[in-house]
Every structure is written in C-alpha cells, then in structure tokens.
Amino acid sequence: MTTQMTTQIKKAVFTMEPFTCPSCVKKIENTVGRIDGVQEVKVMFNSGRVRVEFDEHKTTADAVQEIIVKLGYPVLSKKVA
C-alpha cells in the first residue's frame, strides 16, 4: 500500500474596509500570491473582500491575514472553508 500526502486546499474570504484605489488590489494580490502554498488570490474591489485558496499544509488563513494587515489593510472578519 502506498502512502500519499493529499493536498488540503482551503478557501478563506477576508472582509476588509472598502478599497480606495486599484493599486491596493495589485499590492495585495502580488504579495499574498507569493506566499508558499497560496494557489489563488482574488481581490474583489467593489465588495471589499479578498478570496484566497491555499494549501493548509504550507500556510494558514491566520498567516495570510497577518500579511494583509502588515501591508496596512485591516481585516474586519474572515471565513475559512
């Protein structure tokens, strides 16, 4: 019997304060996209949300949130599924 390490992809949605400029979108997408384990990051400008898909064996929603906050964008809430 072979043992396989399965990839656990989780999705997190972070609710933010409203974004004020398109450069905010690029800054978050580029920085979060470079985190090891992040598969996809999408900033939804109009709704003030950031959606991230990540491998939970490599990173966590808390780690992603910490990076977003360090960039200067307060996270109001998060949902992980």
Image: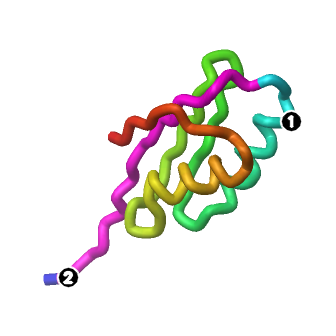
- Front in this rendered view, residue 33 or 71: 71
Q: Position of residue 65 (x, y in %)?
A: 54, 49
Is 1 left or right of 79, judged from the image as shown? left
Q: Is residue 23 above or below residue 37?
A: above
Extent of the magenta region: 2-19
**How busy is the neighbourhood of tag 1: few (under 14 within 10 Å), some, or many (20 plus)?**
few
Q: Residue at x 48, y 54 (%)?
A: 54
Q: Residue furthest left?
A: 1
Q: Is residue 18 magenta?
A: yes
- Front in this rendered view, residue 2 or 10: 10
Q: Amino acid at mark 2?
A: Thr
The kind of secondary structure element at disc 1 is helix
Mark toward the start of the polypeptide (2 vs 1): 2
The kind of secondary structure element at disc 2 is loop
Gap in angstroms between the C-alphas marked 2 and 1: 47 Å
Which disc is residue 2 wearing?
Answer: 2
Q: Residue at x 53, y 29 (%)?
A: 15
Q: Which residue is mark 1?
A: 23
Q: Residue at x 63, y 55 (%)?
A: 67
Q: Position of residue 17 (x, y in %)?
A: 64, 26
Q: Position of residue 5 (x, y in %)?
A: 30, 73
Q: Amino acid at mark 1?
A: Ser
- Splitting the image into 4 quarters, where does residue 18 fall? top right
Q: Residue at x 45, y 52 (%)?
A: 61
Image quadrant where one finds the N terminus: bottom left
Image quadrant where one finds the C terminus: top left
- Front in this rendered view, residue 28 or 71: 71
